[in-house]
Image: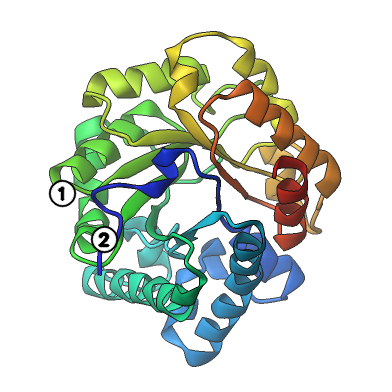
Amino acid sequence: MRLYRDALPQLSGRPFLTDGGLETTLVFLNKIELPCFAAFPLLGTEEGRGELERFFEPYIALAQRHRAGMILDAPTWRANPDWGAQLGFDADALAAINRTAIRFIAALRRHHSGSGLPLVLNGVIGPRGDGYRPESAMSADQAADYHRPQIEVFADSEADMVSAVTLTTVAEAVGIARAARAERLPVVISFTLETDGRLPSGQTLGSAIRETDAETDAAPAYYMINCAHPVHFEPALTESGPWLERLRGVRANASTKSHAELDAATALDIGDPQDLGRRYAGLRERLPNLTVLGGCCGTDHRHIAAICEACF
């Protein structure tokens, strides 16, 4: 059942949580091998689905404890044609695994339906290329064509929304937003930022949001920042302008290291969860509509717990 597609509850001002760094938790903490850093193949086995269920449970418990909503992300960040091909998934197999992913989080929602909290089903889209480097730039039309099959699967499912995360260019964001709008599916755009607070393409965050809105008639429901530490993007938020009101979510990294350093890392840097929580509290004071709080690389339920303690 599509509960929230016509009215996303996180737009009401109520705080919502997301999970933390799924892939880094599975690889570094749970010692699970993820070729191409892709979690979606785990959906193909009972053991893999069990690992994913155990990953989500602490976050849902935190949402229940703090009476926050929860956005349940499908583990589909890498479930697109280029990455799927490297893992042996053709177009039909990708469509099937994306459908399975939404059924998986829908089952989680049904299991926790007695909590009375809004649990939003989110189909996750990742960039065509590497989330740290805009090496395979596409036009907006090319991006729409490329990502449309995955969006169509989500639109035909129970998903309430779709989020495109770790995006590095405006063109890809525009293409995804246009494709989602054509399917009447709410879409969220989340950019990744470098240590200078800019997109990997060099564009400022404010400029990227303004341009995406202009090219899509403000199609995104809201914008987010992910895969960067607050110390990297806090200075970018000192700029004034209506674009700041479009930022509703942050999923920060645990580490203050650069993307290049993290890409080469062989050990997990969990940073300082309490400091991260305090920085989120500061972000909530600075960003009037910041309601969606979660984590990205290196974060786990301990970081989200610290964020909850600092913010609620």
Picture quadrant of residue 260? top right
| Earlier residue among tags 1 and 2 | 2
x 64%, y 69%: residue: 61
How much space separates mark 1 and mark 2, taking CA atoms?
9 Å
Picture quadrant of residue 187? top left
**What is the secondary structure assignment of the residue under circle 2?**
helix
Number of labels in the image equals 2
* Front-lying residue, 237 or 15: 15
* Front-lying residue, 165 or 12: 12
Q: Amino acid at mark 2?
A: Phe
* Front-lying residue, 155 or 40: 155
By what rule are the colours in the image chosen?
Answer: rainbow
* Front-lying residue, 271 or 198: 271
Whether residue 93 appears in this view of the structure is yes
Left or right: 112 as drawn, with respect to 235:
left
User: In which quadrant will I find the N terminus?
Assistant: bottom left
CB-based contact (under 8 Å), mark 1 and mark 2: yes
Local crowd at mark 1 within 10 Å, few (<14), some, or many (≥20)?
A: some
Q: Position of residue 116 (x, y in %)?
A: 47, 67
Whether residue 133 appears in this view of the structure is no
Picture quadrant of residue 274? top right
User: In which quadrant will I find the C terminus?
Assistant: top right
* Residue holding disc 2: 154
Local crowd at mark 2 within 10 Å, few (<14), some, or many (≥20)?
A: many
The answer to whether residue 221 is above or below residue 285 is below
The answer to whether residue 127 is above or below residue 212 is below
Q: Which mark is residue 183?
A: 1
